[in-house]
Image (spheres, rainbow, N blue to C red):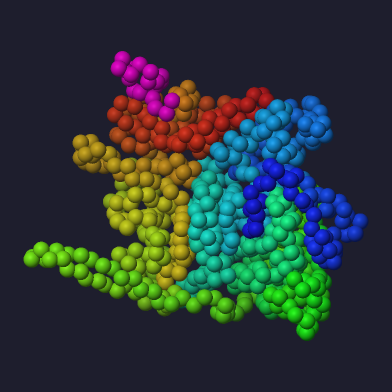
Amino acid sequence: MDARGERGNAHDGYHDIQKTNKAFETYYKAQNIVPESEWETFLDCMRSPLPMTFRINGSGKFATDMRDQLEGTLFAELLKEELKDEEQNELPPPKPLAWYPERLAWQCSYTRAQLRRLPALQGIFDFIKNANELGSISRQEAVSMIPPFFLDAQPHHRILDMCASPGSKTFQILERMHGDFDGNTKLPTGIVVANDVDLKRCNLLTHQTKRANSPTLLVTNHEAQNYPIIKGPKGELFDFDAILCDVPCSGDATMRKAPDIWNRWTPGNGNGLHTLQLRIAARGAQLLKVGGRLVYSTCSLNPIENEAVVAALLKECDGALELLDVSDELPDLKRSPGLRDWQVWDKFGYHPSFRGEEQMFKLCETMFSDEETKKLPLERCLRLLPHHQDTGGFFVAVFQKVKPMEIKEDVNAKKQTVKERVRLSLNVNAKNEIEMSHEVITLARKGQTASIPPEVDDKGEYLLPHRGATGPNGGSRWLGIDPVLPVNDPKVINSIYSVYGIESDDIALHKNCVTRTADTSRPKRVYTITDSLRQYLACDVNESLRVTSCGLKAFERQEIKDEVKEQEETSGAMCDFRLTQDGIPMMFPFVRKRIIRPTFDDFKAILERRTLAFEYSAEAPQRAVISCAETKKALLDLTLGCCILVPRDEDLAAINVSKADLAIACWRGRTSCNLLVSKAETIHFIDKIKVNAAVKMDTS
């Protein structure tokens, strides 16, 4: 689970913590979130360790093949014997989450210590450890997987994840956006913007979502409650089809995972977050398109952070939002209805009304349920209780925007002043005296009116401008973060088109490539973005967006040495940019040149050995040599540079795998063909071959 307020897994030393808190029991009994008959069961569950859960990443055939192999081998072995822990207590076998589609998410009721110490569980421990590192699975708390399903994300949607780090939910959204994009030429036309207030967490978010290999993704670093409102030059709002507000919360529903919360829980823990949560949700409502969905969620049981925020948002939006009944979605998910009435407590105790004369601490009127609140359909909210399906606790509310709403300036937002930086320069004059000069550089004020609208092409689409002129040294106005710059130098783009056989009508690299390198004629890395993402960035004429990551790294600069360069430039077969392995899943359907189809033996050999020589050498007898003369000739016919290796059709058919699944980036050198894939990714490819080969044998 990755909602705000969580800690690391605390199974080790779990039983050393006293899991009792009288104030917690008194408070939640008074709130009636759990029926009286289930109270002891609820408490017992809250005091027990949280089962480990994971979901199989991706969609389509590889995901289902991995599931089938797990069920048919690893998990099947556990069903053959009665499994017991060191105290001889019976342990249940792994089971799929009942509500998750296609049995692609699993629950294992074992602690870390049991996974490490019990020989019968060694296979599961090794699988989870290795598959998580390789990106085949994601360890994620069960209830944390729920909110993305209620977004109803589609490939053409604009989606905003307002509090996204560490990125597990964003990853789910990206999977849904791409659907079964597997060797076809249909890219998503929407965008996914993943935002977090903490810059370090943005970097974690970028790392976690890297495996999605998506050109639709933009990672930004803003306070969610003050997320920039982007408008086009004609004043049109760039709004979103779906928004996820998984807001910061007290996290008291995560006690099974973070038992130290028992000792520090107080009735007022959630009170201090209520206003922030409401402001984030209200900002989301402003940015939401009419007809779009907003999903509000917390990992808290507290109605002050949940129903009170939902009620206040409905009132504040004055009929622009409707609270949806989603009882028919995920029908196998057990849930409790939301409350219409609750109690407000602080360190002084219970307060029946905000109008009371008694002393209060950090309370506000929107925390209280009133007569208007009791008429709202708050029962449509979902409260997920731990004892229902052996999970953590969670809260979800799903809204639909039914009419436009006025966008008001947030009076609580911090006013951004004009900042200045001084650039110093030292020069030695003709008399060998050092002269010092300084220049005061004024950074652009947030929200200032743009003087130049975005450039428009012949189809009326906004083009990404060269930006960053408002900061020091020509850099971005966001100090420390490089600007996003367009790569449209004809020499760069045309060489990529020509060498790799990519057609501009299929994928518009001349419009949709960006870099973070200041010299865009010699970019170090080239990222591809979708049309929608380009237009979003182009409309940000004031550079309000603090972008930490943008699009998919598709190409990387790797120049060929000078002695070869001149002759290849004259032949038109020279390109200073190689395909990255990250970019191949998206670019492969559009690449028509420099694709080599080796035998399966040579393909596996280059994965295992990382380099294959063209000829045997007595000086290096240990070097593996390409065994197939046809493959060697095809490689030698290429000029030096990057190429893609894909097994032949008959070999792919033998293990029932698509071309895109096993396309790998290599470098055709002078004497050998070398793998351009990291060691971790290489293991992932070898694992793909083994998984599909095993499934093929089981079904044949």
Determine the residue positioned at 46% across, 61% down.
547
Q: Is residue 427 magenta?
A: no
Q: Residue 609, position in %: x, y?
A: 43, 25
Determine the residue positioned at 66% across, 68% down.
273
Determine the residue positioned at 32% across, 58% down.
518
Snapshot quadrant of residue 148: bottom right
Q: Is residue 252 above or below residue 410?
A: above
Classified by dominant secondary structure, the portion drawn in magenta counts as loop
Q: Residue 396, position in %: x, y?
A: 72, 61
Q: Quadrant of the C terminus?
A: top right
Determine the residue positioned at 78% across, 84% down.
357
Q: Residue 331, position in %: x, y?
A: 78, 53
Along the horizontal axis of the image, is 474 left or right of 386? Answer: left
Q: Residue furthest right?
A: 37
Q: For the magenta stretch, what is the residue range?
A: 609-630
Q: How many marks?
A: 0
Along the horizontal axis of the image, is 618 left or right of 687? Answer: left
Asked whether 59 or 161 is in front, the reply is 161
Asked whether 251 or 181 is in front, the reply is 251
Q: Residue furthest top?
A: 618
Let me know if residue 476 appears in the view.
Answer: yes
Q: Is residue 134 above or below residue 170?
A: above
Asked whether 552 or 264 is in front, the reply is 264
Q: Is residue 628 magenta?
A: yes
Asked whether 659 or 522 is in front, the reply is 522
Q: Residue furthest left?
A: 431
Q: Residue 187, position in %: x, y?
A: 51, 51
Along the horizontal axis of the image, is 279 left or right of 311? Answer: left
Let me know if residue 337 appears in the view.
Answer: no
